[in-house]
Image (cartoon, coloured by chain):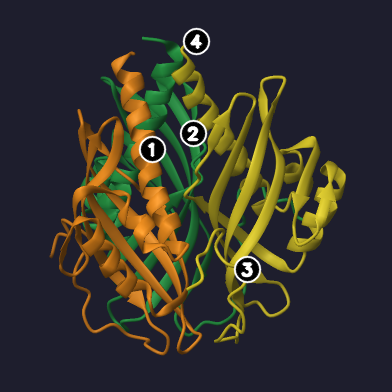
Chain colours: A yellow, B green, C orange
């Protein structure tokens, strides 16, 4: 197959991994989300988690306080390199808190690397960066760190 | 043409139907949105509406209270099967209410099937699911149903 | 190369220009964002700005009051015409205001034309339209103009 066509298929397949991951999180299925990682994949979720089972446990913890989550992806800039790839993508996530019933909003980045194993793409490593939040009742934010990756301070 | 190339073109064309539908809704053009459906298409908008004219009438009703709508699509997972396709996509929709002048926010899913007629893709059936909302002045939400499709209760 | 493959590559490349522009704005890099324009590009940001240096100066002014911005793109409808292209895309942008520490939300449209120069795509002209906003402490909006492009008044 034409190299350009293969690359277009790879871009599509990698984006679909991101979409499946979001689908699994929003379906309250941390194991399904963790299955988007390679077996030796690494999740950097405010701490390093190695392998699908550690990642699933961490995701379980991260979503336990929410009755609803909705992870809306955009701005993916996937860079292919044969059987590997890197990407940054934007995520806006809506959350409904179980305790208070109030909404929480999150704006973040996924800094990813991907790997192709037996013809299928998996997340090799994902670092999650939250660049801003709105918590119920909190009008102001004390810190604006971390920044968008590569933010230029002036 | 190469089968893979045809599939990439189909994925693109189907996504453009979704985008045109959103454009038409946001342009206050329910007839234009309904024209994205096949002639015998079915819209499941909290009730079943059959054919473009029923769908246009239903959409007219659904958007009549809003001075502004803005439907932001993402996370489309289109699955091709020849001249048919299925998809789930995420939608966040901003609304400005005519009466109060206040904003309303909506997070939903489009559960779609598509059909190719004379070389052009149309929506065969669309079910719209709203998984959460923020109405002005409403801090809490009594029910979190319906859920994200396939949500795992624990 | 197959014409259809070239067009799919062009669609991808043009979307990546939009994504890089958003990345550069969110990284507080107006010069980097302006470099997404052709040398004689035109930015219509509530006024006409010609060439990268005028555009960078205008962008600097537009983002100076925000500690954080996050521009989430979607709904791009890119139309190719050889070495030129046009597009409308949706943008939701989160902002954190420096002075008050409060959030500001923006829903807009990018009305773009693109040009290919030496094999690389650039923005030839961009008109930015904000169709709605939420400012802290402002519950209602006095005007709903400008409208979504092509909005049908009834």
For discs 4 and 2, the disc positioned in front in the rendered view: 4
Identify the image quadrant of residue C15: top left
Instruction: Report the chain holding disc 2.
Output: B
Q: Chain of mark 3?
A: A
Within the image, what quadrant is residue A92 found in?
A: bottom right
Picture layout, residue C14 above or below residue B81: below
Q: Which residue is mark 4?
A: A1
Sort mark 4 into few (<14), some (14-19) or many (20+) by Cα contacts within 10 Å.
few
- Camera-side residue of C24 and B47: C24
Q: Quadrant of the N terminus of chain C?
A: top left
Residue identifier under label 3: A146
Asked whether disc 2 touches disc 1, contact meaning CB atoms under 8 Å apart, the reply is yes
Gap in Å between the C-alphas at discs 3 and 4? 43 Å
Question: Contact (CB < 8 A) between labels 1 and 3?
Answer: no
Residue where numbered disc 2 is placed: B78
Q: Residue C82: give x, y in percent of width and height.
A: 20, 28
Residue A119 can be seen in this image? yes
- Disc 2 and disc 1: Cα gap in Å? 8 Å
Residues indicated by labels 1 and 3 sit on the same polypeptide chain: no
Question: At numbered mark 4, what does the secondary structure look like: helix, strand or loop?
Answer: loop
Q: Relative to residue C115, is residue C73 drawn left or right? A: right
Query: Which residue carries the number 1 mark?
Result: B15
Tell me the SS state at disc 1.
Answer: helix
Question: Which mark's residue is nearer the viewer, 3 or 4?
Answer: 3
- To the question of a shared chain for discs 3 and 2, the answer is no
Q: Going from the N terminus, do you reach mark 3 or mark 4 first?
A: 4
């Amino acid at each position: 197959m034409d190299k350009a066509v293969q690359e277009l298929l790879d871009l599509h397949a990698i984006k679909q991994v991101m979409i499946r991951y979001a689908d699994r999180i929003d379906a309250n299925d941390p194991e399904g989300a963790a299955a988007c990682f390679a077996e030796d994949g690494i999740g950097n979720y405010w701490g390093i988690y190695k392998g699908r089972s550690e990642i699933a446990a961490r995701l379980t913890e991260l979503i336990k306080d929410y009755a609803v989550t909705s992870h809306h992806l955009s701005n993916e800039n996937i860079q292919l390199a044969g059987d590997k790839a890197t990407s940054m993508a934007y995520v806006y996530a809506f959350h409904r808190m179980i305790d208070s019933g109030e909404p929480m909003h999150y704006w973040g980045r996924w800094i990813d690397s991907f790997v192709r194993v037996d013809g299928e793409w998996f997340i090799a490593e994902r670092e999650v960066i939250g660049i801003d939040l709105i918590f119920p009742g909190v009008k102001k934010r004390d810190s604006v760190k971390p920044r968008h990756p590569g933010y230029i301070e002036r």
